Amino acid sequence: MGAGFNLTGYNSKGEYDGRSEFSSDGFDQQGFNRASFDCKGLDTHGFNYLGLFVGFTYHCEYLPLSQCQHRSQDGLSREMVSFSPGKHCADVACGDGCGCSFEGRTYRFGESFESGCEVCLCSYTGAVECSCRHLTQRKEVRDMTLAERETYQQAVKMLYSKRGVWEDFARIRAEYVPQANGQYTFLPWHRYFLKTLERELQRVSSCEVSIPYFEWTVDAGSLATSAIWQANVFGGNGEHKTDCVSHHPFQHKTGWSPCLRRKFNTSVALPDAINIQLILAEEDFHQFSLRIQAISGLFHLWVGGNMASLFSAYDPIFWSHYAFMDNLWMQWQELRLDGLSSYPVELRYVKMKPFDIAPDDIMLSQQQLCTMYVPVTLGTPCNLTTSHKLSGFNKERYNGFRPPGYQRNGDNRDCLNWRARNDHRGMYDKKGFNMQGYDRSGFDQMGWDQYGFGRDNYDRDYFDHDGYDISGYNRYGFNRLNITSFGVRPDGTFTASVHGEDVEKLFENGYNKYGYDMFGFDHNGFDVFGFRTDGYDKDGCNFYFQGPHYMRFYFFIQLQIKMLGPEILSRIKRICPSITPLPEDWLVQNWMALDAHESLSLIRLIEQNWAMQHPFDGDFIPNISSVKEDGIWLPVTPDLRFCFELHWFSGCPIGTAPLACPDLCKTAQCAGYPEAECRVHNCGSCFTEWYERETDSHVMCQGW
């Protein structure tokens, strides 16, 4: 303002400019301030302080759902913001208020305030800009330490105990579903919705709390056995008659009211990691957003219960699922230089209800929302400094029970003592589960103990609590008698039935065709899972030494598929069914099929494209033994869990199956390196490769 006066008419000395046409709030009778902007930050033509047109007219109509959805077909000139069933226009707020609206409060332009872990400012554009005091790191659920997971669970408990707060989040998602599921607002709306809840969790707990994301493509082929459904992680499926999840870590002794409901629909086929990579390759934002929205809907339908309703945000898994969806959007943005400008300009500055935040205010997750995502497995500590028990079983194979099956207090699994009298302590409910959701044998409703072992005593890597796999071999290839599958003892001697020359054929030059010696180590001293005998990997970390190994497989597989283009990815054969098409009633309920000739047709076209990019491998035979046909032991890889064959120990990259090649090394020679070791390359084609024996490094022969 002139002469150093601000918008309310005062300068730095406290002097007033004397303009009587403006009130003490700085506005004239027409509602404009000294800079000719109203209390919403707009001039008479609807432009804000940055010269951007953001002046929109809001109005309310009392219409049935079908007519309201029909109004949304007018293109970008009209957008449905919310739908409130059973309410009249007089019952709902419609339009913008003055200043900045932030988490239920209104702030004046230029006003600064603290919000939990951030310092915020109400800018003159009407947007709230916050600076980071603490960068929130969202980890994959399985990468959280026990302390981090319990802190998050406790924060949800505390927030739920605040009367009506958790339910309000579910209500907001249901009421504003037209914009939450809008073709262009789906991703930014949920990004800010996530941050809104995260701020509330941090208020009741600490700035260290963050919403973990659930990368369910890790379990695409076996989602029902995912670790997330354990009673001590997110709780499992609902009960048969009520769909209520009787035990989950987010409830107090009294439980949730209404109950948390889930009804798993395992007939829904979800996308795998390759499908996701193909979606990330989509260049157009609208096409990308629609694809993410479609796969998001499939996860809703797979979980069922609350997740299959408009009040899906009532289920804590909703938030971790959408954190995964938001993570995918952030990856999509990082993959292209125009990740920001690709968003439609005409919608970029339109405020999203009920937050009054525009997509432009949250485009950069780390810079604008103080939030970043940690890739799978990279969120764990490098080392375990304290030992942890692998399972709940003792050396007599009892989980809390003594032979012949009685607990220390004298009660057995049937709640009876040796005198056949009932246990009256009240530790277990009528169905035999304690407060944590575990029965007297230590297993939850889904059949897992708190350490990740199933009722069959095997974990998700198919190893038992003693470290032996389904064929009875440990990670080094020795059975319980300390003998390998080819008859060698740890001291290098052979069993009586084994001929030494047969073993030597398997281990020419000391290593088998997979690159491991007779004792299960490669040229650098690492076992099949990448660890030395002291439990450390090449990076000096031991966190994953005892598993879960499938998470590390997933991490390394991700590195490979991110290097592949859509053409190669589309040719990789799968061993799971192609992605399930979304039912039409779901599309209508979630405002995704407003125009049968356009929106619905576009979604069906996307689904047809997914089917063509999903070749099914009808010849795949699952591994039922870890001992190969040649007698060599290798661990069972998580092919069925990931939905495609890894060919991991063949050395071939994803998408290239190993071939049965002739012995090309029999007559081959390496000029210049006569001591070099010859190996037959059999990935997609057959040719010889040469390696230095000492270092196992690749060498080039003269004349090649």
Image (spheres, rainbow, N blue to C red):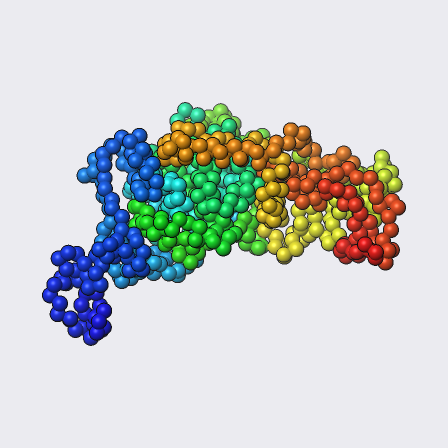
Q: Residue at x 75, y 42 (%)?
A: 685
* Left or right: 154 as drawn, with respect to 89: right
Q: Which of the pair 554/605 is nearer the observer?
A: 605
Q: In terms of image quadrants, where is residue 456?
A: top right
Task: Estimate the x, y position of residue 411 in percent, counting from the top left.
Answer: 50, 31
**Number of numbered discs present?**
0
Q: Residue at x 29, y 34 (%)?
A: 68
Vertical comparison of 618 with 176: above or below: above
Vertical comparison of 643 with 195: above or below: above
Task: Estimate the x, y position of residue 124 in percent, counting from the top left.
Answer: 28, 60
For the C terminus, the image quarter is: bottom right
Q: Residue at x 68, y 41 (%)?
A: 656
Vertical comparison of 690 with 178: above or below: below
Task: Estimate the x, y position of residue 676 in percent, counting from the top left.
Answer: 83, 54
For the N terminus, the image quarter is: bottom left
Task: Estimate the x, y position of residue 702 in percent, counting from the top left.
Answer: 83, 57
Inspect this view and state whether residue 69 appears: yes
* Left or right: 355 as drawn, with respect to 495: left
